[in-house]
Amino acid sequence: MTAETDLLERVRDKLRTDTAIGFDEASIVLAISDGAFLVDGEVDDVSIKRRLLRVVAAVVTPRPIIDLLHVRPAQMMADGMIGDLVRDALLDEPALANCRLRLWGKGEFELVRDAPFTTGAIDIRVENGVVTLDGEVSGLGQKRLAGALAWWVPGSRDVINGLGVAPPEEDNDAEITDAVRLVFEKDPFVNPDQIRVTTTNATVTLDGVVPTVSERDMAEHDAWYVFGVEDVVNRIAIE
């Protein structure tokens, strides 16, 4: 057995120990390419993707990881429609009102909005259902909110949040907690007054009581959508 084959088997064995991932039932391909560890395929939701990549990183680090793993979309959509919906979501968000927006289409970025008092700029590109956000915003809260809004678009298979922050901000658990609470407030399917959010070492813990399983699951997904979250512990009870 070669060293690469042994590494692949160790990763597979580790993934099988986490029942939340459901590795044997999922359409996941693991490979080693030019020294990097490649993860490809499609999973049911963002929590599985994040947990799977965390397990892989724990085994293969410091080997680089090529992440081609996507989330099965709630609705199949063409890239153009996904881009339009992400654009509209960012346009409608008051917290991003002073950001210049551009959308990739027909081989170039088309200006969507040029704010009179610009404090940031966001470029939107969609390829094969993967939304990429590039540019610069004025705070980590804006960066995280923009990413969550992109995730909420039904056709999104993944969101690559490449937004920079100027001036730079030091990230911490309190920033993550504030961002998760803000995302809850923006989500019409989640009642933020019923959920308590705490963060320790980038692990978000959700406590509280909600009336339905769907709201409980949506709250967890919202937390996973927030940039910088490493893990989510969902202790929300059903009323």
Image (cartoon, helix red, strand yellow):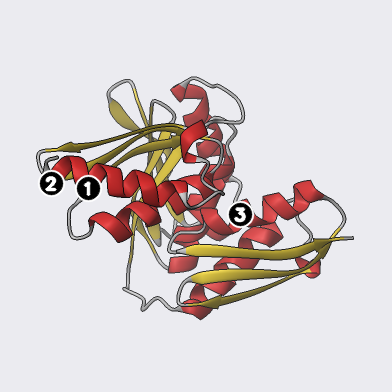
Sort mark 3 into few (<14), some (14-19) or many (20+) by Cα contacts within 10 Å.
many
Q: Is residue 24 above or below residue 173?
A: above
Q: Is residue 227 left or right of residue 58?
A: right
Q: Residues within 10 Å of mark 1 (few under 14, many from 20)?
A: some
**Identity, as a three-letter code, of the amino acid under mark 1:** Leu
N-terminal label among 1 and 3: 1
Where residue 138 appears, as percent x and y from the top left, is 40, 66
Whole-Å distance between the Cαs marked 2 and 3?
Answer: 39 Å
| Residue depicted at 28% across the width and 28% down the height | 108
Between marks 2 and 3 in the image, the one whose residue lies nearer the viewer = 2
**Residue 85 percent across, percent down from the top left:** 56, 33
Badge 3 amino acid: Asp
**Label 2 sits on what residue type?**
Ala
Q: Nearer the viewer, mark 1 or mark 3?
A: 1
Q: Secondary structure at mark 3?
A: helix
Quote the CA–CA distance across marks 1 and 3.
33 Å
Task: Using residue 9 as the reference point, say whether residue 203 is left or right of it.
Answer: right
Image height of 19 relative to 145, above or below: above
Say if residue 77 shows up in the picture: yes
Using the image, determine if residue 173 lies above or below residue 190: below
Q: Which mark is residue 222?
A: 3
Q: Quadrant of residue 131?
A: top left
Q: Residue 122: horizontal and vertical position, in percent?
A: 39, 48
Residue ID for mark 1: 7
Q: Residue 90: tell me if it is visible.
A: no
Residue at image point 61% right, 30% down: 74
CA–CA distance between discs 1 and 2? 6 Å
User: Where does label 2 land, which residue?
Assistant: 3
In the image, which disc is placed on residue 118? none
Pointers 1 and 2 in contact (C-beta within 8 Å): yes
Q: How packed is label 2: few (under 14 Cα within 10 Å), some, or many (20 or more)?
A: few
Q: Position of residue 197 (x, y in %)?
A: 65, 73
